Image (cartoon, rainbow, N blue to C red):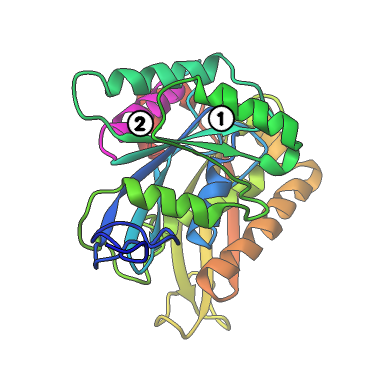
Amino acid sequence: MSDEQQVPGTTDGTGAESGGVHRAGFVALVGRPNVGKSTLTNALVGEKVAITSTKPQTTRRAIRGIVTREDSQIILVDTPGVHRPRTLLGERLNDLVRETLGEVDVVGFCLPADQKIGPGDRFIAEDLVEMRTGRRGPRVVAIVTKIDLVGRDVLAEHLMNVDQLMDFDEIVPISAVKGEQIDVLMDVVTRQLPEGPQLYPDDQLTEETRDDRISELIREAALEGVRDELPHSIAVVVEEVVEVDPDGDAFTPVEPGTGRLVVRATLFAERDSQKGIIIGRGGSRLKEVGSRARSEINALLGRKVHLDLRVKVAKEWQRDPKQLGRLGF
């Protein structure tokens, strides 16, 4: 066999597989809060399917982004950041991560290059090692994120420390913001997936519903500029998306595509003081939230919308099982 010949099912040097092999499966991105999981999900999908924020614990659901390539389909699960929970909501988010890890083919363990490995990273690594003990657990790829924020020497030292954290199948340094090594990461992940047919249509980018995506965009806008405990106390519910007569009653529905699209949503806070912060003096801050969210919703839906936002108090909803259920958790 010459050097140019390929064994069926091996790579051709570009990362793609020869021999007509197609791979498909689920890949969970895990890590401490605010390590770049949502930014990476959006970079891999090529469209915004997960909200991003500098506030930790922004992601509250296992959001599925879908990457379809000629030789593979990667279904990304962007999980909430694993943390030491202080509320029932926090416990449910951690449980969601563990449940997700038991159902995927590959885990992408995100470790930011600009932060030293800490107790939270070791906690996740211990969980992953335990999952792989005594049975076939998921493959684990270490994804060293935010490499654009550090120099080569710092990155080299960090990569060595990551390598000692656990027995990874692969380690890939990337920058989602700069788009560095994203194609390499997709090739690496593809090699770890099982052989199988495509699971979703070519044009489907996410499993999130329209209303879920709208509520997340509103919450993302509401998180901007707030501090302390308020980011974790905000929840958003889309009450309805309806077309109304632009020249008549604002509550009279019309045929799809013939009227003005109205999105009505409610933001929930846990206390009256938080409600006041969200609304702002004379409603100024709520107007900013609406303007920022409306721009994103217009892009999502491909048309201009009228956004009607209300703010209500759901006392201590993060600790109340009934209210968590009503708010979708």
Q: Position of residue 158 (x, y in %)?
A: 63, 27
**Label 1 sits on what residue type?**
Pro
Quarter that holds the C terminus:
top left
Q: Position of residue 150 (x, y in %)?
A: 74, 36
Residues 35 and 90: in front is 35
Separation (CA) of disc 2 from disc 1: 14 Å
Q: In the rendered image of this protein, does residue 205 appear above or below residue 91?
A: below
Magenta segment includes 89: yes
Q: In the rendered image of this protein, does residue 305 appear above or below residue 95?
A: below
Query: Magenta residues: mostly which secondary structure?
Result: helix
Residue 227: tell me if it is visible.
yes
Q: Residue at x 35, y 31 (%)?
A: 96
Q: Helix or strand or loop: what does disc 1 sit on?
A: loop
Q: Which residue is drawn at 47% across and 27% down?
A: 317
Region rendered in magenta: 88-104
Numbered badge on residue 195: none
Q: Check whether the beta carbons of the residues at disc 2 and disc 1 lie within 8 A of each other.
A: no
Residue, disc 1: 33
Q: Which residue is drawn at 50% across and 53% down?
A: 184
Residue, disc 2: 96
Q: Quadrant of residue 91?
A: top left
Residues 67 and 183: in front is 183
